[in-house]
Amino acid sequence: MHIGPDIVAVMVGVAVDGPYSYRVPEGMRVERGSIVAVPLGPRLILGVVWGEPKDSVAHNRLRDIAHVYNVPALSEELLSLVEWVARYTLTAPGQVLRGVLRSPEALDAPKPVVAYRRTGFEPEKLTPARLRVLDTLNDDMAWPRPALMGAAGVSASVIEGLERAGALEKLEMPPPPVVLPPDPEANPARLNPEQRAALDRILAIGPHEFGVALLDGVTGGGKTEVFFEAVADTLRAGRQALILLPEIALTNTFIDRFTKRFTARPAEWHSDMTPAQRARVWRGVLDGTVRAVVGARSALFLPFRELGLLVLDEEHDGAYKQSEGFTYHARDMAVVRAHRAGARVVLSSATPSVESRNNANQGRYHHVVLESRFAEASLPDITAIDMRVDGPDKGGWIAPSLAREVFAALDRGEQALLFLNRRGYAPLTLCRSCGHQYQCPDCSSWMVEHRFRGVLMCHHCGHEMRTPTVCGECGDAESLVAVGPGIERVAEEAALRFPDARRVLLSTDMGSHAQLRQRFGEIERGEYDLIIGTQLVSKGHHFEKLSVVGVLDADLGLAHGDPRAAEKTFQILTQVAGRAGRASRHGKAFLQTYHPDHPVMKAMVTGDREAFYAQELLAREAGGMPPFGRLAALIVSAGEQQTAMGYARQLLSAAPMAEGIRLFGPADAPVAMIRGRHRVRLLAQSGKDFDLSGYMRFWLSSAERPRGDLKVQIDIDPMSFM
Ligand code: ADP
Ligand code: ZN
């Protein structure tokens, strides 16, 4: 399509309600999706040609498009995704577009590589350095300059001297691709019959068709192998594939597995990359040289033009929810994008979200089940340890029966894992004399002791103080006590009880991503006997020697009273228990709990997931909760609690009447203060067919705008709804 000739609408990549009209100068050709630079105020800014201008503006008052980049236009599918996301999340389309566009450096033509080749002419003056260069170039191949300098061990001036002498010819070669193309035929897995059947059902959705498959299979069931074959099928069909992982920065093993299967590394997309690396991947995705990407949730906004498959590994994972800036859930967004692109979606999990299970039950998603573990591996036996009768000795956190199992595993030369989903040493520091509790000055949360670092730290804002030795309130010197366990405290107990075991402590604050990746490698190689860790160890890892898993506080996630608490707890317990016995060893998992009769613990022990999902869905339906209803939250924040509360009340009184809408609040948000800002929440609930985004937009546009230091944050589909 060629719009024009003269005026087009351009969406600029800034948070404004665009698009704006611009003139297309003589001789410039643009189409919908063309990436351009346009003047906005005093600056030049990146934008995208959106289409015909909406309203007629006098021609002579418009400014010219400054530049059109020589890259393929963004796909129609991506443009409509931007519009959809903007509308759904109540965000300015320009702001969403900013998340799609990269720096201009990604748009300029990739720089050619300078290379040299021999001309055949031999200069008279031949120093040893010059000879080494000529020797290196013996076979008439052209060598890129840095490679040549390295191989011959010379500086650039030696090479340039030879060029001036007429012995070398300077060439410009196209830059190498970001990654080599993955080869779908390289190392296909030999799927067992169950895996084969699962793959066939996924592939029954054609490579140019929209459809969602929920790949619902036990941990270690070989789901990864199955969706790799779906990737291969997509590549064969000439389409691009995107695999999303919840914690990509920590998952070397996944990249390695991909590389083995396809004999080429996938392009990666995550926060550990430099801007230059990102620019290259972005460009490669747009011009089609990149065929497969493994990335974090933001990879959903990469400029694919031939997207044929989206995989979300561990689709239930909370990391898929973006909660800063504009809030979106990658799972929903993947389905929306795939629908527009005519692509397949594979949602993979051993513990699918209640939402996805419901979609499968209703027949909206294909429910593809893997029942058994791959090869000789079997699912672990799960036992609840009733802490009321079999609890640990005073001052300890590990029950005697669990300790015995750990000893037995160590004796057999196997690995054991002690799991507690809480970083630090103790969640609370308390003065026994005056009762003072250490709280963050800026947040409504306790200061968590991190003993290795000698600090108390707020897990909401990162505020730190040196661990006090005397009570800051009453001055008593001997009265401060650590209350409750964190993972460091478990490590301390483990050191006393299992002194001969080679132990490793893993939580996100125990090192850089690179260091943590190294630890995982060491565990896989069997360099440790006892692993002590937080949620970090529960995901995706395959530790062959691990046979015993102990969860020290299985009730931890249930305490919040959040209606999603049961689901989240069930998921994390299943994931962590599933680390045991993934190879031929039989695994056992132990859950220390004060509520062995809780439905979650029962489902874990009996292995009856179906009963759990059925009950959870019934409870959600009865409460009109997702996926049977919709929710949206407004978080009003301000420096003073009254200011926030006052404005929230004002908002509530301005709420339009609508049938089927229920409003809750204002009330203090679950975290009532963060970084010195008081937070008050309003919650709107509707039936599932109601346009709640539209309602919220109408509500906010009819209310008085927030002034002063007031801020309103909108969260459509909030993940926690208490
Ligand atoms: P999941 O993703 O369901 O947790 P994985 O795909 O990681 O399971 O498989 C578990 C283990 O079994 C892995 O070590 C994997 O390499 C192996 N495996 C699974 N399927 C096959 C297969 N068809 N051929 C060879 N090995 C397989
Ligand atoms: Zn804080």
Image: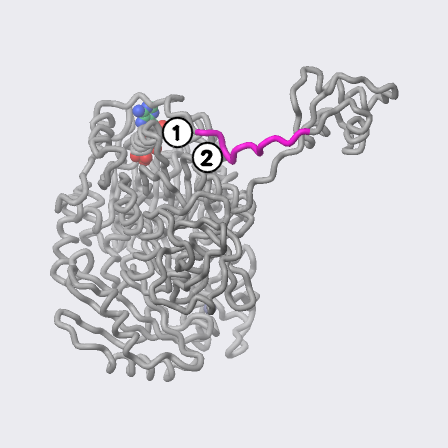
Q: Is residue 43 magenta?
A: no
Mark earlier in primary sequence (2, 1): 2
Q: Mark 2: which amino acid?
A: Thr
Nearer to us in this view, 353 or 545: 353
Magenta stretch: give its range.
171-181
Q: How many marks?
A: 2
Considering only vertical position in the picture, is 44 above or below 529?
Answer: below
Q: Position of residue 157 (x, y in %)?
A: 80, 33
Residue 159, position in %: x, y? 77, 29
Q: Nearer the viewer, residue 419 or 624?
A: 624
Compared to residue 455, the image places residue 510 above or below, namely above
Q: Quadrant of the C terminus?
A: bottom left
Q: Quadrant of residue 411?
A: top left
Judging depth in this view, the residue of 305 and 492 nearest the camera is 305
**Crowdedness near tag 1: few (<14), some (14–19) or many (≥20) residues, C-alpha within 10 Å:** few
Q: Is residue 599 above or below residue 289?
A: below
What secondary structure is found at the residue carrying circle 2? Answer: loop
Task: From the image, tell me which residue sits under label 2.
Answer: 289
Distance between the alpha carbons at the discs numbered 2 and 1: 50 Å
Which percent across, then down, holds residue 291?
A: 41, 34
Amino acid at dot 1: Arg
What main secondary structure does the magenta stretch of the protein show?
Answer: loop
Please indicate whether residue 139 sits to the left or right of residue 368 in the image. Answer: right
Q: Nearer the viewer, residue 478 or 514?
A: 514
Is residue 108 among the parts visible in the rendering? yes
List the residue tagged with mark 1: 412
* Residue at 12 percent of width and 55 percent of height: 618
Q: Is residue 573 visible?
A: no
Mark 2 nearby-residue class (10 Å; few <14, some 14–19, many ≥20):
some
Viewer-nearest of labels 2 and 1?
2
- Secondary structure under badge 1? loop
